[in-house]
Amino acid sequence: MLLASVNLNKRLGASGARANLAAWLREHGVKIVLAQEPFKPADRTPPALGGFVCAGGDGHLAAWVSEDLAPPAVSSLAPWVQRVELEWLVVLHVHLDAYGGASRAAQLAELAAMTTAEKGRPLLVCGDFNLAPRAADGLFGEETSTFTTEAERQALQQLTRVASLVDTTADEGPAFTFERIFNGKPSRFRCDLALLSDHLTATTTVIADASVRNGPAAFTDHSALLIDLPLTLQAAQLDDVLFALSEVTGDGPAAQARREYQPHKTAMSRQAPSPASRAVTEHLTGPLGVRSVLDHGCGRGTDVAHYHSAGLEAEGFDPHDDFGWPRPERTGFDLVTSMFVLNVLPDPWQRIQALKDVASFARPGGHVVVVTRSPEEIAKAAADGGWTAHHDGFWSSQSKGTFQRGIDPGEITALARRAGLVPAAGAPVLTLPGVCHAVLTKPEA
């Protein structure tokens, strides 16, 4: 799903700029537009944008969504920051003070508090920050600009550190997003930024497009950020007809949007323990001194029986009531296993929440083992089965409501850090062909 973030410098009210913007949006297939300074603040009604519906905002910050999609929840947290909820992703859409460094530093501190309030939810913080993150990102003539203060840069670094955000366009070098002539000298800045949760960078592409400020088709003086996110948004409801054909047939985007996820339907009926659980008892429980284990998301419980047979004090838990494994009353397990659970959850926020729940059952200093299907295995299964792309993975069965995504060890670890877990130093490596895993620990208090 393609999102565009751009400072329009109050030009959306002009028909020529609006037509150029609409043509650019169609050319790239943009579905969400986040605009800073879209029109004059005194104008009360947002200008119409062909093919889009205004989801909320004003002349400082506004959001538009493609008319074929359900509008997202949009709220104003302050005049300079807008919160946009896109399925599992929260976007903080910003336009920081254009005139005062002290004001920008204070706003960045507020942003850090806002991200903390999201309690680990996947985040995109984007917009016009009106600062150069690094000295090389701001030049006046051929010299380093003094417009951005060191206090601002420190506040930005604190924001990215607290929220585990990545400045997605930093590696491109000083690709300036704003250029003007002041006092006869060129002023150049990379000030339009997209800060993204670190575990999303592998599945998200961010490009700064300078064409929107150059040539006859230009509609602003800032580069636009094109952010391709692993999101599938719900289709708009067709209120202007009695019923849609997709509602009769059960096909199409409207029906898919209503379909509930049913991850429990991926649980296998096993006569023997899984290779992953056998690897745990063969290579981990002894070296780690494990006496008690909880299989979190145990399905029908075959692996719980295996842990019992290995002489461990074992319990199981599965949130699907029909499996008959209610939530344990105790916590403080030496080891909590999560076998092939993360890869059937349809978005990163649910995976983080699941890992937080896993971590709550481990004792301080205890361990967590997470096993997932590998990206290569899922890619092959999706190609062979003709699976439909959904969010960052696939519907493995749309009729059943089941989802699959391959998750590599790096992504497991990045998600686990959001749940307060860290890689276990010196833990044995499991031999598990065709799957991925991570051995983690819950730090001592």
Image (spheres, rainbow, N blue to C red):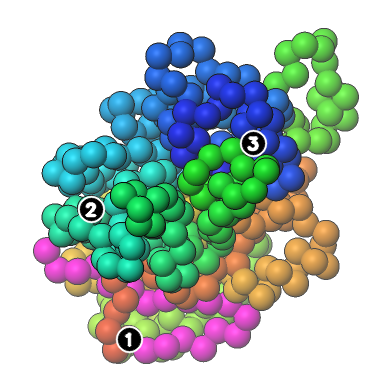
Q: Residue tagged by mark 1? A: 427
Which of the 4 image quarters holds residue 284? bottom left
Highlighted range, magenta:
428-445
Q: Is residue 62 left or right of residue 244?
A: left
Tag 1's secondary structure? loop
Q: Nearer the viewer, mark 2 or mark 1?
A: 2
Which mark is first along the chain, 2 or 3?
Answer: 3
Which of the 4 image quarters holds residue 68? top right
Residue 202 image label: none
Q: Residue at x 46, y 64 (%)?
A: 175
Q: Is residue 266 above or below residue 376?
A: above
What secondary structure predominates along the stretch shown in magenta?
loop
Q: Amino acid at mark 1?
A: Ala
Of residue 2 and residue 253, the one placed in the foreground of this image is 2
Does the segment drawn in magenta span residue 440?
yes
Does the segment drawn in magenta span residue 44?
no
Q: CA distance from mark 3 to mark 2?
A: 30 Å
Residue 171, position as x, y percentages in the image: 43, 71
Q: Amino acid at mark 3?
A: Leu
Q: Residues within 10 Å of mark 2 (few under 14, many from 20)?
A: some
Q: Residue tagged by mark 2? A: 147
